[in-house]
Image: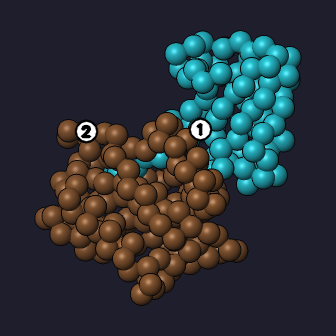
């Protein structure tokens, strides 16, 4: 059940400068829980206070956006590749 | 501190002016040593918002970000941060800027007043995400 997670350069400093981690998880939700459980700073940058994913963080399972799959309940299988990618946004209002 | 040459800064100003009244955006490439970011190159990007939205928002999509990571790696550079313009607003980050920012990056903002680029300021989000602090900008001649 091991899944490979690709970490964007923007977040590597919160996870010992790793660009890849292997995590055992059956769903995206479980994967996110495990990913941030030992990295408080990563949690703060990726998740809001109520535990939702920040709007600018995108998660792909094998290049498919989880928004178009089953979101947090998207099932994972051994060998899947999960990619975390931030969008960069802002503006005057 | 962020160090950037005058030519790159002028390029950002021109991008901001030609995009007015829409916001422009782009990336800052270079190297980081301790607390000093030295910009070697700017990468202008399209604002993925259009129409009215683009007048008060900018967006660099996840696909754009993947392109930037790849390009930076090929150039042996780091993504140091991003720039964007504030049409008819001060060069200060908005609440929306803060919600969307990551502490790892520098955010350079150029104010554009009636089509003319004015103040430029650089900001870094603190780790607890509560506020930006202003970065000293060192403008070099070459
Ligand atoms: Zn802004």
State the quadrant of the N terminus of chain B: bottom right
Question: How far across and down, in percent of the image, does residue B71 sit?
Answer: 55, 51
- Residue at mark 1 to residue at mark 2: CA–CA distance: 22 Å
Report which colour depicts chain A.
cyan
Q: Which residue is mark 2?
A: B50
- Secondary structure at badge 1 equals strand
Left or right of B9 on screen, residue B53: left
Question: How far across and down, in percent of the image, does residue A56 sit?
Answer: 51, 39
Question: How far across and down, in percent of the image, does residue B99 sit?
Answer: 49, 48
User: Which residue sits furthest left?
Assistant: B114
How crowded is the residue under tag 2: few (<14 C-alpha within 10 Å), some, or many (20+)? some
The answer to which quarter of the image holds residue B72 is bottom right
Left or right of B70 on screen, residue B54: left
Q: Which residue is mark 1?
A: A85
What chain does mark 2 sit on? Answer: B
Left or right of B111 on screen, residue A28: right
Question: At 27% across and 61% down in the image, what residue appears?
Answer: B16
Whether residue B75 is visible to the viewer of this picture, yes or no, is: yes
Vertical order, A19 against B85 (above or below):
above
Left or right of B109 on screen, residue A26: right
Vertical order, B8 against A31 (above or below):
below
Rendered brown, the chain in question is B
Question: At 63% across and 60% down in the image, what residue appears?
Answer: B76
- Residue sitting nearer the eye, B33 or A75: B33
Do the residues at discs 1 and 2 belong to one chain? Answer: no
What chain does mark 1 sit on? Answer: A
State the quadrant of the C terminus of chain B: bottom left
């Amino acid at each position: 059940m091991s899944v490979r997670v690709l970490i964007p350069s923007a977040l590597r400093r919160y996870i010992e400068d790793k660009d890849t981690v292997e995590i055992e998880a059956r769903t995206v939700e479980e994967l996110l829980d495990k990913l941030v459980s030992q990295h408080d700073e990563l949690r703060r940058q990726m998740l809001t206070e109520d535990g939702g994913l920040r709007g600018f963080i995108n998660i792909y399972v094998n290049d498919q956006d989880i928004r178009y799959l089953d979101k947090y309940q998207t099932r994972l299988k051994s060998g899947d590749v999960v990619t975390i990618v931030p969008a960069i946004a802002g503006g005057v209002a | 501190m962020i160090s950037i040459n005058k030519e790159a800064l002028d390029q950002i100003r021109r991008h901001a002016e030609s995009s007015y009244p829409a916001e422009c955006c782009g990336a800052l490439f270079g190297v980081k040593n301790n607390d000093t970011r030295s910009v070697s190159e700017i990468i202008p990007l399209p604002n993925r918002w259009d129409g009215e939205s683009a007048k008060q928002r900018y967006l660099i999509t996840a696909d754009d970000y993947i392109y930037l990571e790849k390009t930076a790696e090929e150039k042996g550079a780091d993504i140091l941060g991003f720039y964007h313009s504030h049409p008819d607003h001060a060069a200060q980050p908005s609440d929306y800027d803060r919600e969307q920012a990551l502490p790892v990056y520098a955010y350079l903002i150029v104010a554009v007043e009636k089509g003319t680029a004015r103040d430029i300021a650089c900001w870094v989000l603190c780790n607890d995400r509560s506020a930006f602090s202003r970065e000293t900008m060192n403008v070099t001649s070459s």
